[in-house]
Structures are given as structure tokens and as C-alpha cells.
Amino acid sequence: TGMSEFNGRTYPWQASTGTSFSTPMVAGCIALWLQANPELTTDDIITLFSETCNKLDPSLSYPNNVYGYGEIDVYRGLLRILGIDGIEGISHEQPSGVTFALEGRSLLRLGFAQPSAAPVQLRIYSTAGSLLLAEQLPSGQMSSELNVSSLPAGVYAVQLTSSDSQVNGSTLIRIVER
């Protein structure tokens, strides 16, 4: 049991196991994937699990009765559904030490859990894989802002690359019409 702060609010949490906990987690994962592609079938979902879950014990074959298909990687599955998991330069993992927030449709704010130890390369890609924006963010920052008003409405992959491992990774943003 613990408490975590996010965007100025404190949230309680606790670790839990078993089907009573895993069932809503899996349902939420599938619901997110269905929002990205409402045409997914049961077979499509099973294929996503088999291709994107993390295999916790490499000595076992998957699926099995201990881990099923493995630890669900919701983000990696989402990248696969959107067809952007194969784009060169986009990480399949989200950065652990960065928060992202869109203000309106023109400003992307990044918050760093601690001052970045090294400069950060920020790149924004379309879902087709085109590099649309690139920016070098200086080290030592707790936050940064990027004007994204030149981007049309759509979904974009934001890639951060740095020698600071907590900053490395990608996330998806969705810009909506005004």
C-alpha cells in the first residue's frame, strides 16, 4: 500500500494479485485497443497478446497455465494496432520520468520527475512514420513546452531520446480540431 502524487493530486494504491484484480485490468486493456480499432476480433486480440506480451520466464513456452501469454504490454499492443510499432526511431516503451500534457491544441507540456541529466532530443512522428517536428531540449530542465499548432488534428508519436534512461521512450498524443 502506498500513496503517489500525479499532477498535484495524491492517489492511494496497493499491489494485488489474482483473477479479481487481473480481469478488470485485461478488460481495460482490450477496451483501449478497441477504441483504437473497433473492428478488432477476438482472434485479433489473442494475436496481439501472443505478439506483444512480455515473456517473463524465457525457459517456458507461451501460452501456459502460469503466465498465459505473459505480462500484457498495453502500449506496445496499441502501437501495433495503430501500425506504428515498426517505425524506425520510435521506442516501444514510455518514459518513466516524464509526464505529457496538451494544453488546448497548440501547446505540449513536458514535466520531468527530476532535472534531466543530459540534453533530450524530442521528435514527433505521424502514424505514417514521417518526422514532423524535432527539437533539442537542454539538460537541467524540470519542464519544457513545445508549440504543436502547426500539426493538423490526429494521433502522433512523441519520441524522447537522451542518455538519461528515465527520459527515453515514446508516448502518443491526440490533437483534436479546434
Image: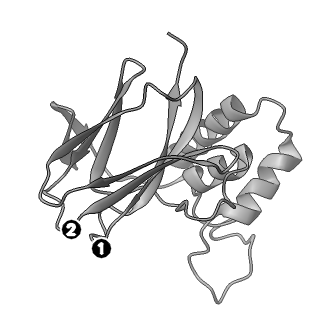
- In the image, 51: left or right of 78? right
Residue 134 position, x and y percent, is 43, 50
Q: Are marks 1 and 2 in contact (CB under 8 Å)?
A: yes
Q: Which residue is found at the position 11% from the left and 58% from the top?
A: 140
Q: Is residue 60 above or below residue 68?
A: below
In the depicted view, which residue is nearer to us: 74 or 69? 74
Q: How many numbered badges does the structure rendering display? A: 2
Q: Is residue 146 left or right of residue 82?
A: left
Q: Which mark is residue 163?
A: 1
Q: Nearer the viewer, residue 174 or 42?
A: 174
Outermost top residue? 178
Please, what secondary structure does the residue beneath circle 2 have?
A: loop
Dot 2: within a 10 Å radius of its alpha carbon, few (fewer than 14), some, or many (20 or more) residues?
some
- Circle 1: element type: loop
- Name the disc covering residue 64, or none: none
User: How far apart in space, not on screen, are marks 1 and 2 (Cα)?
Assistant: 6 Å
Q: Nearer the viewer, residue 133 or 155?
A: 133
Point out residue 29 in the picture as x, y percentages from the top left corner: 60, 42
Of all residues, the one furthest to the bottom in this rendering is 59
Colouring used for the render: one colour
Q: Nearer the viewer, residue 21 or 140?
A: 140
Left or right: where 122 falls relative to 84: left
Q: Is residue 116 above or below residue 81?
A: below
Report the residue at 75% width, 34% height from top.
37
Q: Which residue is mark 2?
A: 118
Q: Residues within 10 Å of mark 1 (few under 14, many from 20)?
A: few
What is the three-letter code of the residue carrying label 1? Ser
Name the image quarter holding residue 149.
top left
The three-letter amino acid code for the residue at tag 2 is Ala
